[in-house]
Image: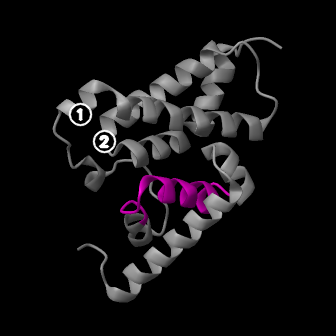
Amino acid sequence: MGALTKEEVASLYRRQAGMVYQISLMLLKNASDAEDAVQTVFRRAMERDEAFAGPDHEKAWLIVTARNECKNQLRHWWRTKRAEGTEVDTLTWEQPEDGELWDMILQLPEHEKMALYLHYYQGYSTGETAELMGRNPSTVRSWLCRARRKLKNMLEEGEYGK
């Protein structure tokens, strides 16, 4: 096992950049910051000393690394000193097909939307989602239940877009 070759990194980028960007944009709510996070995540992938054990390991590593990079950016001192843009409203990345529902998901608290994204859009079980998020499976199940309830209320009460 050795470091990833340039070709392997390029292939990894082609396969997974969209997912990493979606996670980053969802957490950072800013396109340029999300692009920076994607760049950092793939730079870290290039710096890895060992190859991934398989596709599942590769995807899980990218998700956790993207989440951690976004958290690091959000904690950085300059983040609190600037005005927030409205770039989430003009997303340039490929959104899931259910656009109105996706817009509602983006209104949820960070932990709930991340749990929904990993579970429903990336297909992870609640146990796997919990592991990726560094939480207990019961906590993730509670977040999913709460998020579904909030989404249902938004749909029923017509709160979407307010």
Judged left or right of residue 23, residue 13 is right
Quadrant where the N terminus sits is: top right
Judged left or right of residue 121, residue 123 is right
Which residue is tagged 1?
Answer: 80
Residue 1 in view, yes or no: yes
Q: Residue at x 36, y 35 (%)?
A: 74
Quadrant where the C terminus sits is: bottom left
How far from the left and from the top, in percent, is residue 53?
A: 82, 29
Callout 1: 10 Å neighbours few (<14), some, many (20+)?
few
Q: Residue at x 31, y 34 (%)?
A: 32
Which residue is tagged 2?
Answer: 30
- Local SS, label 1: helix
Amino acid at circle 1 = Thr
Discs 1/2, front? 1
Q: Residue at x 61, y 63 (%)?
A: 120
| Distance (Cα) linking label 1 and label 2 | 14 Å
Judged left or right of residue 24, residue 159 is left
Q: Is residue 117 above or below residue 104?
A: above
Q: Residue at x 72, y 12 (%)?
A: 49
Residue furthest left in the image? 83
How far from the left and from the top, in percent, is residue 95?
A: 44, 57
Which of disc 2 and disc 1 is earlier in sequence?
Answer: 2
Camera-side residue of 162 and 53: 162
How far from the left and from the top, in percent, is residue 19?
A: 55, 44
How far from the left and from the top, in percent, is residue 107?
A: 36, 62
**Residue 112 lies in the magenta stretch:** yes
Which stretch did the figure color magenta? 105-123
Camera-side residue of 129 and 41: 129
